[in-house]
Image (cartoon, rainbow, N blue to C red):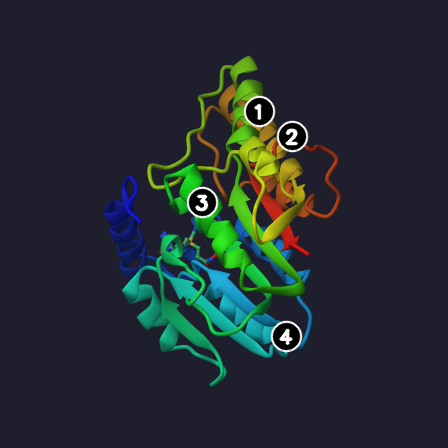
Amino acid sequence: MDYKFKQDNYDFWVERLNSNSPNQVCTNDVGLDAIESNAILSRISDGASILEIGCGNGILYEQLRRLFNLEKYVGTDFVKELVAHCNTKKIHARDEFIQLDMTQVDSETFDSKFDFIVSKRAIQNVIDHKLQIEAIDNFGSFLKDGGLMILVESSSNAQQRINSARQEYKLPKISAPFHNLFFDDELIRNHTFQNVNLVDIEPFASDFYFVTRIIYARYAKEFLNEDPSYDHPLQKIALSLSEKQRTKDFSQIQCYLFEKKK
Ligand SMILES: C[S@@+](CC[C@H](N)C(=O)[O-])C[C@H]1O[C@@H](n2cnc3c(N)ncnc32)[C@H](O)[C@@H]1O
């Protein structure tokens, strides 16, 4: 399906593959990326079959293969160059990387079902809420009974709450990048999916965003007179808060959990 900025999005990811170190192809914030991966890795177990939506340059794949004795892993991405790159680092002969546009999944796309279907900031690349929902539902038809879909994606609602708090302290508004449309949580909560049920939306990075985007942002502006940096100690303290979420509202990145509809 066509949608806004689709080709620009494709070109954006090719450019990042060609100009960044492997751990920074898909994100600039390596610390936060580890927390995001952990939201997925902490739920996986040995013997599982895994389908990844938007596998990028295969960073999560390598972690999954290092930590678990998987039955099978299938990575999908619409960028041919990323899929070719992933194929050069295949760890197990059973694993597959497939060039696939997530808006074109149908009942014939895969010939087996999976214990886990996962994504990390991939579905938010589709700049159309209806197509995002269709992609979730179409992938959901390939979830095994008792399987779990773990989508780590950004929330426009949480971003609005961060911006309301920032406004109180005259901090500039944060916007989604041009190639992303963050999830609309109300739309997802209220939608009746055919193949999956929403189990939970977990705000696993709320404390991280509260400390970095509000507390540290104020400190940098009001006391240090400098722009926030990923290397600042407060950034590291924020990362260490990931185990216990004392706040709930500020998790710009969230874990959307779906189970197979019975
Ligand atoms: C933020 S990266 C995530 C990569 C990987 N999950 C990771 O965390 O390292 C988003 C990925 O989504 C892919 N993507 C964007 N639009 C897509 C589409 N319509 N179909 C499939 N993949 C897409 C991009 O090519 C990119 O590799």
Q: Residue at x 41, y 34 (%)?
A: 176
The CB of the residue at mark 2 lies under 8 Å from ligand 1: no
Give left or right: position of 216 versus 175: right
Residue occupied by mark 1: 161
Relative to 21, residue 30 above or below: above
Question: In 3D space, how far apart are the residues under numbered discs 1 and 2 (Cα atoms)?
Answer: 7 Å
Q: Nearer the viewer, residue 130 or 245?
A: 130
Residue occupied by mark 2: 249
Relative to 217, residue 121 above or below: below
Secondary structure of residue under mark 3: helix
Q: Quadrant of residue 234?
A: top right
Residue occupied by mark 4: 68
Q: Quadrant of residue 113?
A: bottom right
Q: Earlier in the sequence, mark 1 or mark 3?
A: 3
Q: What crowding class fits label 4: few (fewer than 14 Cα within 10 Å), some (14-19), or many (20 or more)?
A: some
| For the residues bearing labels 1 and 3, Cβ distance under 8 angstroms | no
Place of residue 100 in the rendered image (x, y in percent of width and height, measured from the top left) = 36, 63
Q: What crowding class fits label 1: few (fewer than 14 Cα within 10 Å), some (14-19), or many (20 or more)?
A: some
Place of residue 12 in the rendered image (x, y in percent of width and height, measured from the top left) = 28, 49
Q: What crowding class fits label 2: few (fewer than 14 Cα within 10 Å), some (14-19), or many (20 or more)?
A: some
Place of residue 241 in the rendered image (x, y in percent of width and height, measured from the top left) = 69, 43
Relative to 223, residue 130 above or below: below
Q: Nearer the viewer, residue 91 or 243?
A: 91
Q: Earlier in the sequence, mark 3 or mark 2?
A: 3
